[in-house]
Amino acid sequence: MVHITQLIYIQEGQEDVFHEFENVAIPIILKYNGRLTLRIRPDQTSVIEQHIEVPYEIHFVEFDTEEDFENFKKDDERKSILHLKEKSIRSSILIQGKQI
């Protein structure tokens, strides 16, 4: 099992474009034995260290195997909408781990 945590920071005013990207990308996860287990939209009260920027969303995703995750990233439908991701996401932090 592969576990992905992603902190997503959105370009100001591009929330609708980001949601358009997610509406296509999230269902694709299922094609590759993946699951979006949590999607959190934190607010300022969620951050302990107040000097840290609050991400727009935090995603927790799991895939059965590393190969499933790699195949998801190569999916042609997902690739066809990457322009929406690039337009809407200013930056992101992806943390990959395994259950211990």
Image (cartoon, helix red, strand yellow):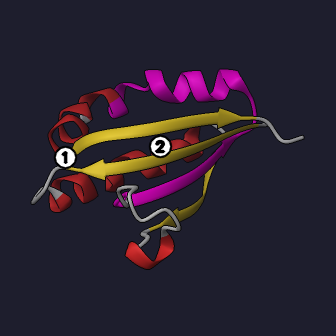
User: Which residue lies under the disc numbered 2?
Assistant: 28
**Identity of the residue drawn at 78% across and 35% down:** 98
Q: Is the residue marked by circle 1 packed among few (<14), some (14-19), or many (20+) residues within 10 Å?
A: many
> On the rendered structure, is 28 left or right of 86?
right
Q: Residue furthest left?
A: 13
Q: Quadrant of the C terminus?
A: top right
Tell me if residue 72 is in the magenta stretch.
yes
**Identity of the residue drawn at 38% across and 40% down:** 92
**Identity of the residue drawn at 74% across and 29% down:** 65
SS at badge 2: helix
Tell me if residue 24 is in the magenta stretch.
no
User: Which residue lies under the disc numbered 1?
Assistant: 88
- Residue 76 image offset from top left, x and y in percent: 36, 25
Q: Quadrant of the N terminus?
A: top right
SS at badge 1: helix
Amino acid type at circle 1 is: Ser
